[in-house]
Amino acid sequence: MVVCLSRRILASVAIAVLLFGGVLAVAEDESTPLASATGTPEEPASPGQPWSVPAEDSCNPQGGPIGLTVREDVSGVPFKTGDAFEMERLNVLRNYLPEFLWQERERFFYEGMRLEIGPCFRDYSAPDFYQQATVEGAGKARLDENRGLVDYGAGMPFAPESIAIDDPKAGLKWFWNVQQRYQAAGFSGKFRLTDLLGRIGRAEPFTGEMFKILLSHRADRADSGYETPNANDNNWVAGGLFFEPFNARENAWRQYRNVENMTVAKRSDDLHAYLPQWRRVRRVNANQVEGLYMPSFSVGVVPNQQLAVGGGGAGGVGAGIGAGGLGGTIQTKRSGYEGLEFRPNLYDPKIAGIHDVLAPINIATPVYPEDEERSFGPWGLSFASDRWDFRRALVIDATLDADIGSDDVSRTLLYVDLQTLQPLYMATFDSRGEMTNVGIYAGRWSEDHPEYPRWPNDEDRPIRVLDSVGAAFANLSMNGSWRRESWDNVSTPPPDRTVKRMISTGELTKRR
């Protein structure tokens, strides 16, 4: 126990050193720098244009760093597209992974893996209609005195070229950009969420279906003021249904996030749930549910008098109620969709730096439900045997308000892809500064799949979306972990009449 505690303390100190002063730094004994957002090698970015992305296929980006203390690199990037790395050569890639992931590498990489280097800075940019909405809204969106977002239509609220490096609100502006990043119309699909308990990794799987439908600020709806007919003052509606285990079967929920939430940080979501034991839909307390909600259930082997029903947010906060039934000692408390939905006005976010990283942003090997038997290594957390792209990441260091953050999560370090703002990696820290969770996200590019569903109102409209089809998180504070798989997630919506039915609370009981 003393050895484990010392290791945890040293890990926390290392992270603190790397982030001291609000910037990322490389240790003196590392030769490859953390690359920053720069211009071309011949013409470095000007102070007003710091957020550029390297040209497609430029596998050895050059240029000066932003606020990073690094040693000059003379060897170049030690890999190229098509190279493959096994565990014994992983050290070569160290500088191209977040330090917090490297500290827990035994959980995410394993003997027998084969990590293939994918494209360098492939163009995953949003379609023209989203970019046009950004242009048309340029200079209109602004931050209010409570860190809220006002006068926003659609697209990216704050164009990158308008954000100066020394802007004291640069972190908050980028965090709002992340929240309002291009996601087509949301997502829907089947999922498998697996709780991996303790170091032995005993699996407790949950399967079901989940969706989130954007109703307001939709760039594809320019002709109707960027709203859908079913918005009803909601920003988005999410919901789901459990298939298994048996004790959770047929439990369903709907989560409504009002547009008021963008300016009133503590405005609770409207949350409704159905359990067969209740025989009706009930309103659930959604106080402090920040991210996408999913009930939590006890499904262990020890009988209990309560079936716990709670909600996990992106920051680990949640609400709970009880319902009679058989349960157990093992609980799923994570939604599986942490880090995909934030409330930026609850945070004090800073730009920690820029880091060129390898990430499974567009994996090639299917997961559940297409492949139910895929191996994820001995810890059950690894996407290492797959294709990893070379990407430029924006690193945001966000601290929750003191009265919102929990003992387990009070600060989040988030890596997002600079071009798409899709989450790549995340680490959370408790109120004492110790790291509590380390996570990695896996994505899938719509344009690589000819069968991808088209827009219902315009089949010729481009999709160009990165779907989140997997995530794996190690919980360091509880010595547990979890993994989400959702390979068939799609982000084009069903027709409006189907959406109206899906988002209704009446739909919760119709299948039962």
Image (cartoon, grey):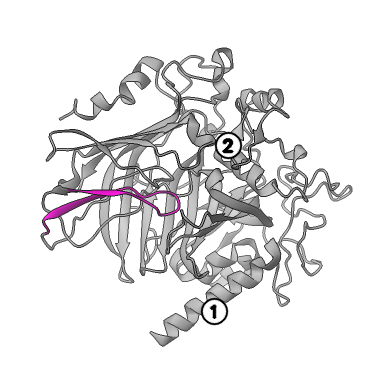
Image quadrant for the N terminus? bottom left
Q: Which amino acid type is shown beneath numbered disc 1?
A: Leu
> Which residue is outermost to the bottom?
2
Question: Residue 143's image quarter?
Answer: top right
Residue at 60 percent across and 52 percent down: it is: 348
- Check disc 2 and report the residue beneath it: 181
Percent across and percent down for residue 446 are: 51, 33
Circle 2 crowding by C-alpha within 10 Å: few under 14, some 14–19, many from 20:
many
Q: Is residue 124 magenta?
A: no
Q: Going by the image, does 156 lie left or right of 261? A: right
What is the three-letter code of the residue carrying label 2? Arg
Residue 101 drawn at (x, y percent): 53, 65
Q: 419 and 337: which one is in front?
A: 337
Residue ID for mark 1: 10
Which percent across, then down, holds residue 276? 14, 38
Was residue 306 drawn as part of the magenta stretch in this picture?
A: yes
Q: Is residue 156 left or right of residue 431?
A: right
Q: Is residue 112 visible?
A: no
Q: If you read the primary sequence from the N terminus, does the residue marked by circle 1 or circle 2 appear first?
A: 1
Quadrant into which the C terminus falls? top left
Q: Which residues are magenta?
A: 304-322
Q: Position of residue 444 (x, y in %)?
A: 50, 41
